[in-house]
Amino acid sequence: MAAPYAELARTVGEASYGVTDEQVAAARRQAGSDRGAFEVVMAAGVGAALGCRDPGDRGGGG
């Protein structure tokens, strides 16, 4: 993944509270739109959530 996307995705995945305005602005500039930056953030967030999921958990609730 190319910069600045890699840095933004890594920050979202590791500690999303640490994302800076500058990281988002750089991704927006590179993508040329808000949508491009949004897609990077969403993909990183979903990836982080799936990485935290217990593969043995089948939702049995107990």
Image (cartoon, rainbow, N blue to C red):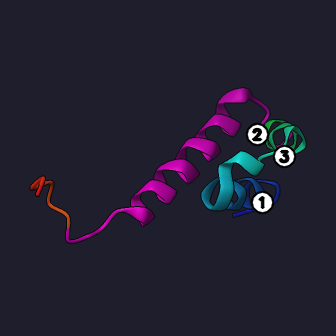
Q: Which residue is mark 1?
A: 7
Please, what secondary structure does the residue beneath circle 1 have?
helix
Residue at the far bottom in the pictured view: 56
Instruction: Give the left or right position of residue 42, taking residue 25 as reference.
Output: left
Instruction: Give the left or right position of residue 17, taking residue 32 as reference.
Output: left
Binning the other alpha carbons within 10 Å of mark 2 as few (below 14), some (14 to 19) or many (20 upward) gives some
Q: Earlier in the sequence, mark 2 or mark 3?
A: 3
- Seen in the picture, residue 39 relative to 54 is either above or below; the reply is above
Q: CA distance from mark 2 to mark 1?
A: 14 Å
Q: CA distance from mark 2 to mark 3?
A: 12 Å
In the picture, which quadrant includes the N terminus?
A: bottom right
Location of residue 33 (image quadrant): top right
Number of the label disc, if any, that sits on residue 32: none
Find residue 56 and report its horizontal and vertical position in percent. 20, 71
Q: Are marks 1 and 3 in contact (CB under 8 Å)?
A: yes
Q: Earlier in the sequence, mark 2 or mark 1?
A: 1
What residue type is disc 3 on? Gln
Q: Which residue is mark 3?
A: 23
Q: Are marks 2 and 1 in contact (CB under 8 Å)?
A: no
Q: Which residues are magenta?
A: 29-56
Number of the label disc, if any, that sits on residue 31: 2
Badge nearest the viewer, 2 or 3: 3
